[in-house]
Amino acid sequence: RQIAALRPELAGEDGVRVLRHRLGVRPVYKTVDTCAAEFDSKTPYHYSAYELDPEAESEVTEQRERPKVLILGSGPNRIGQGIEFDYSCVHAAMSLRAAGFETVMVNCNPETVSTDYDTSDRLYFEPLTFEDVLEVVHAEQRSGTVAGVVVQLGGQTPLGLAQRLADAGVPIVGTSPEAINLAEDRGAFGQVLTDAGLPAPKYGTATSFAQAKAIADEIGYPVLVRPSYVLGGRGMEIVYDEESLHGYIDRATEVSPAHPVLVDRFLDDAIEIDVDALCDGEEVFLGGVMEHIEEAGVHSGDSACTLPPITLGRTDVEAVRRSTEAIARGIGVRGLLNVQYALKDDVLYVLEANP
């Protein structure tokens, strides 16, 4: 990406990669010596390096007995990248191994269990960028059969790579990139909810203060404002009047058609509900319905939940079940799904869905 910025005639990051491949400049993978040279290290723990003779230098051994599945981890932990993703990745490795697959983990956070040398059959300690992941896929395809790549268990970072990997011919396991986009894209997700007859807080997107003001006037204050290109709670504010809205837009330096601001109706004094579900393409299983102790609007990373819910009635839980089933089928989820709701005045509003 940096070379592409310096050399615009190469037509972006993809153009640089095409040139690099044409020149035969590809990384090779070395094995970390976890035995301090006392005896031969058998730990399949790799990092990339650029060598003069790639054919002679790569230390990825051939493994053709079983098909391989690559699991993309979450990288550095931050808002939107919690430790639950590491838990999911580890259990994916265990389950896939039990199902007869070779498991390959790609992650770059040494504090996670998924990067322990004995969690997966092979570990690549690499950044979770499109370029780095594509090279790992290439190395693994040369040493055996890659059945697919799991992108849904590492949070926002691998989810953001899903479509580009699919476009590059990489097989994606589980929820498709098209389905992921249905949940991520605000307009597309709004259509899924409309088709299912599910209510959501009114919202609009703005690229200027005038547009944001018009949306807020129509929706009514208070409104929730946030950049459309960041995760969860970062850069999000509750705005109660026009003056505060003006201040927010002034501070949001990157407001542009490419980076609009989302303006949502803020549901004051609403009960927030978190649901984790599993869908195999046909049946939907609710893993749990969690009721937030704090009111809706406090980020889930900064709030507490009760399981089972304390104040929700049976009809409320049934409404959550029906809505979650409709969302899972409407998006086309094959795997895990998290849905966040807000209950206000006996109306269940859908806030967002995360495959």
Image: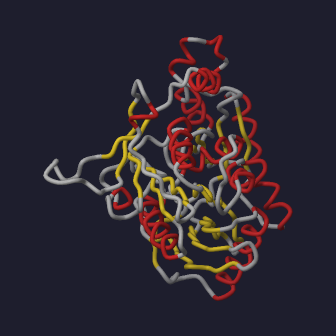
> Which quarter shows the C terminus?
bottom right
Image mark count? 0
Corner quadrant of residue 324: bottom right
- 130, above or below 83, in the image: above
Display coloring: secondary structure
Q: Position of residue 245 (x, y in %)?
A: 60, 35
Nearer the observer, 330 or 92: 92
Corner quadrant of residue 199: bottom right
Nearer the observer, 189 or 115: 115
Q: Position of residue 50 (x, y in %)?
A: 41, 28
Nearer the observer, 136 or 79: 136
Q: Is residue 172 left or right of residue 157?
A: right
> Which quarter shows the N terminus?
top right
Nearer the observer, 334 or 244: 334
Residue furthest left as drawn: 38
- 49, above or below 196, in the image: above
Question: Residue at left 33%, top 64%?
Answer: 118
- 256, above or below 334, in the image: above
- 158, above or below 208, in the image: below
Q: Position of residue 76 (x, y in %)?
A: 39, 47
Question: Residue at left 66%, top 41%?
Answer: 164
Q: Is residue 231 left or right of residue 172?
A: left
Residue furthest right as drawn: 195
Q: Position of residue 74 (x, y in %)?
A: 46, 52
Q: Is residue 89 left or right of residue 256?
A: left
Question: Residue at left 68%, top 61%?
Answer: 175
Question: Residue at left 69%, top 54%?
Answer: 180
Corner quadrant of residue 126: top left
Residue furthest front as drawn: 56
Residue furthest bottom as drawn: 314
